Image (tube, rainbow, N blue to C red):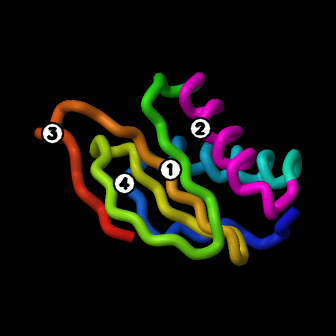
Amino acid sequence: MLEGKAVVRESDMPMEMQSRVMELAYQALDLHEVSDCQSIARYIKQKFDEAYGTSWHCVVGKDFGCCISHLCGTFIFFHVEIMEFLIFKDGKDLNETKEEAI
């Protein structure tokens, strides 16, 4: 497990949701090998789908780029030591989405 403190790079999520996703990241890191990014991402995505409805996406890795559209209030990008976490919810209503490039 990585022991570092989670550092938010960018987010438009409510603080309660941010705290929850970082808690889930630590749980996932306890349950899975740090190198198993797919299992870590799956764990966080499934927990967020259960808690906040479907259509959540989770990307976990050490070095990646992306460009996404997401529902406002559902985006966070943070890191714990060398591992980066991108979590967002996709939506069909383009009036309520925002595009982000990481």
Among numbered discs 4 and 2, the one appearing first in the sequence: 4
Instruction: Give the distance between the C-alpha atoms of the residues marked 2 and 1, in whole angstroms.
Output: 8 Å
In the figure, 36 relative to 2: above or below? above
Among numbered discs 4 and 1, the one appearing first in the sequence: 4
The residue labelled by disc 3 is 94
Residue drawn at x 40%, y 40% as measured from the top left: 89
In the figure, 32 relative to 96: above or below? below
**In-image side of 100 versus 79 (left or right):** left
Q: Which range of residues does the magenta coloring cover? A: 33-50
Discs 4/3, front = 3
Secondary structure beneath label 4: loop
The 10 Å Cα crowd at callout 4, few under 14, some 14 to 19, many 20 or more, is some
In the figure, 14 relative to 3: above or below? above
Residue drawn at x 64%, y 31% as measured from the top left: 47
Labelled disc at residue 87? 1
The residue labelled by disc 2 is 45
Residue 87 at x, y = what percent?
50, 50
* Camera sees residue 33: yes
**In-image side of 9 versus 7 (left or right):** left
The residue labelled by disc 4 is 12
Discs 4/1, front = 1
Instruction: Give the distance between the C-alpha atoms of the residues marked 4 and 2, in whole angstroms.
Output: 18 Å
* Camera sees residue 23: no
